[in-house]
Image: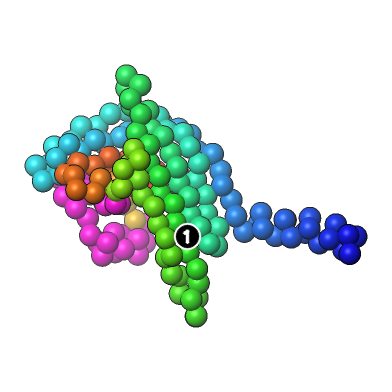
């Protein structure tokens, strides 16, 4: 029995690691701090980021700290677990989105106009032959607040 376990355990660990990957992420970008979404007030600042991002067949994890000028930090967490239904339909079981440890939701806005981009508009861009996301910001908006913390959508896609 022990011999069989010694043979099966390493191969099972290899198959699990082939399905899951969590990697460190680090770099420089531009962070946009929206102080009032309704009034469209925002300021762009250079920032650095560091954290982890990963995905498997059953989970998605993104935990990143952004450091703004003068050392101020902003932490984003977006973790989710999935399961597959019949006919390979993905079902979101649980999702946690936090901005500085406060509940938040993901929104997308146009960087030029600071107007919301609907999921349908974003899907339309995804379907384009050469999608252009230069004006799309990926934002975390605290629940019950009119503010948001945003980074370029292309960056969020590249670290997924």
Return the residue nearer the eye: 147 or 69.
Answer: 147
Residue at figure coordinates x 35%, y 40% from the top left? 101
The answer, for residue 26, to whether it is visible in the render is: yes
Indicate left or right for 140 with 59 as reference: left
x, y percent for residue 109:
23, 49
Residue at figure coordinates x 74%, y 60% from the top left? 12
Give the SS element for disc 1: strand
Return the residue nearer the eye: 109 or 14.
Answer: 14
Name of the residue lying farthest toward the left: 39
Is residue 103 magenta-colored? no
- The number of numbered discs placed on residues in the rendered structure image is 1
Return the residue nearer the eye: 96 or 29.
Answer: 96
The answer, for residue 7, to whether it is visible in the render is: no
| Crowdedness near tag 1: few (<14), some (14–19) or many (≥20) residues, C-alpha within 10 Å | some
Residue at figure coordinates x 35%, y 21% from the top left? 71
- Name the quadrant of the N terminus: bottom right
Indicate left or right for 90 with 139 as reference: right
x, y percent for residue 106:
30, 51
Q: Quadrant of residue 40?
A: top left
Residue at figure coordinates x 44%, y 56% from the top left? 80
Is residue 114 magenta-colored? yes
On screen, residue 107 above or below 112:
below
Name of the residue lying farthest toward the bottom: 87
Tell me, what colour scheme is on the image?
rainbow
Name of the residue lying farthest toward the top: 70
Region in magenta: 105-130
Indicate left or right for 142 with 12 as reference: left
x, y percent for residue 141:
25, 46
Q: Which residue is mark 1?
A: 81
On screen, residue 158 above or below 14:
above
x, y percent for residue 107:
26, 52
């Amino acid at each position: 029995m022990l011999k069989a376990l010694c043979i099966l355990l390493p191969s099972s660990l290899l198959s699990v690691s082939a399905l899951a990957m969590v990697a460190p992420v680090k770099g420089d970008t531009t962070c946009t701090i929206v102080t009032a979404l309704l009034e469209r007030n925002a300021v762009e600042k250079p920032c650095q980021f560091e954290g982890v991002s990963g995905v498997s067949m059953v989970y998605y994890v993104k935990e990143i700290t952004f450091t703004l000028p003068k050392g101020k930090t902003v932490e984003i967490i977006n973790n989710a677990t999935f399961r597959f239904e019949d006919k390979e339909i993905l079902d979101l079981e649980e999702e946690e989105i936090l901005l500085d440890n406060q509940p938040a939701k993901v929104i997308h806005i146009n960087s030029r106009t600071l107007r919301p981009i609907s999921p349908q508009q974003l899907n339309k861009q995804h379907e384009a032959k050469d999608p252009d996301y230069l004006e799309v910001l990926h934002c975390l908006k605290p629940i019950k607040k009119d503010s948001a913390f945003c980074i370029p959508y292309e960056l969020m896609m590249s670290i997924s």
